[in-house]
């Protein structure tokens, strides 16, 4: 299992493991699929935490040489704060400096490179670091983009579930 691989790498090297939020540590409610594309407040605060994955995050967090973080995206700046509040409640052990949320409202991009934004973000964040970087996501478009990176080991969320 990938968690065992990460723990083994951490015996000799520093590891950073970032997790996406929606569909990974927070329930992705398909019935409210387009609600996140509006400026609705508190949309993220009501999401059910996926406790199995949060438990894995905490276990990794407690291992020497492993940093655990969040790399997520949202459409609007107010949703960014909603996500941060959700994390404070449901993943309180996370370090503030390891919470990274991309707000589409604050950056210019086109639909062709939208799914590469997380790849660019992680590559820039760790361009001068000695970390082995893993990212856990559920979006195959993001995963496909990250597979082209030589700096990021991308894993689909299903690889963490026994």
Image: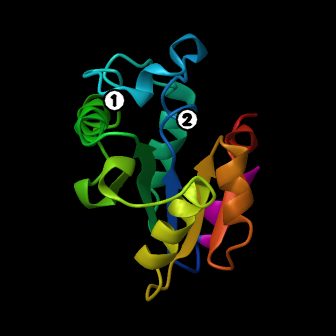
Q: Is residue 4 visible?
A: no
> In which quadrant of the rendered view does residue 83 lie?
top left
Image x and y of residue 6, in percent = 64, 62
Q: Is residue 35 left or right of residue 159?
A: left
Asked which colour scheme the image uses, the reply is: rainbow
Number of labelled discs? Answer: 2
Q: Is residue 143 above or below residue 151?
A: above
Quadrant for the C terminus in the image: top right
Residue in view at x 23 percent, y 33 percent: 85
Image x and y of residue 29, in percent = 54, 17
Q: Circle 1: is it few (<14), some (14-19), or many (20+) Cα within 10 Å?
A: some
Residue 4 in the magenta stretch? The answer is yes
Residue in view at x 58 percent, y 57 percent: 135
Of the numbered discs 1 and 2, the one sitting upstream in the chain is 2
Whole-Å distance between the Cαs marked 1 and 2? 11 Å
Q: Is residue 37 above or below residue 104?
A: above
Camera-side residue of 45 and 55:
45
Image x and y of residue 84, in percent = 26, 39
Q: Circle 2: is it few (<14), some (14-19), or many (20+) Cα within 10 Å?
A: some
Callout 1: SS = helix
Labelled pair 1, 2 in contact (Cβ < 8 Å): no
Callout 2: SS = helix
Q: Is residue 158 left or right of residue 133?
A: right
Residue in view at x 69 percent, y 62 percent: 145
> In which quadrant of the rendered view does residue 144 lie?
bottom right
Q: Residue furthest bottom?
A: 128
Q: Residue furthest top?
A: 31
Residue in view at x 35 percent, y 16 percent: 46
Classified by dominant secondary structure, the portion drawn in magenta counts as helix
- Return the residue at label 2: 53
- Residue range corresponding to the magenta coloring: 1-9
- Return the residue at label 1: 90
């Amino acid at each position: 299992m990938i968690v065992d691989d990460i723990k083994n790498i951490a015996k000799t090297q520093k590891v950073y493991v970032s997790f996406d939020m929606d569909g990974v540590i927070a329930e992705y409610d398909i019935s409210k699929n387009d609600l996140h594309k509006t400026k609705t407040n508190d949309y993220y605060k009501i999401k059910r935490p996926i406790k199995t994955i949060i438990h894995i995050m905490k276990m990794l967090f407690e291992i020497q040489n492993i940093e655990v973080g969040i790399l997520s995206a949202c459409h609007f700046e107010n949703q960014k704060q909603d996500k941060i509040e959700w994390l404070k409640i449901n993943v309180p052990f996370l370090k503030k400096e390891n919470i990274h949320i991309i707000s589409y409202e604050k950056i210019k991009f086109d639909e062709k490179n939208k799914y590469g934004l997380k790849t660019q973000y992680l590559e820039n964040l760790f361009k001068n670091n000695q970390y082995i970087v893993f990212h856990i996501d559920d979006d195959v478009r993001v995963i496909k983009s990250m597979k082209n990176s030589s700096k990021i080991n991308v894993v689909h969320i299903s690889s963490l579930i026994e």
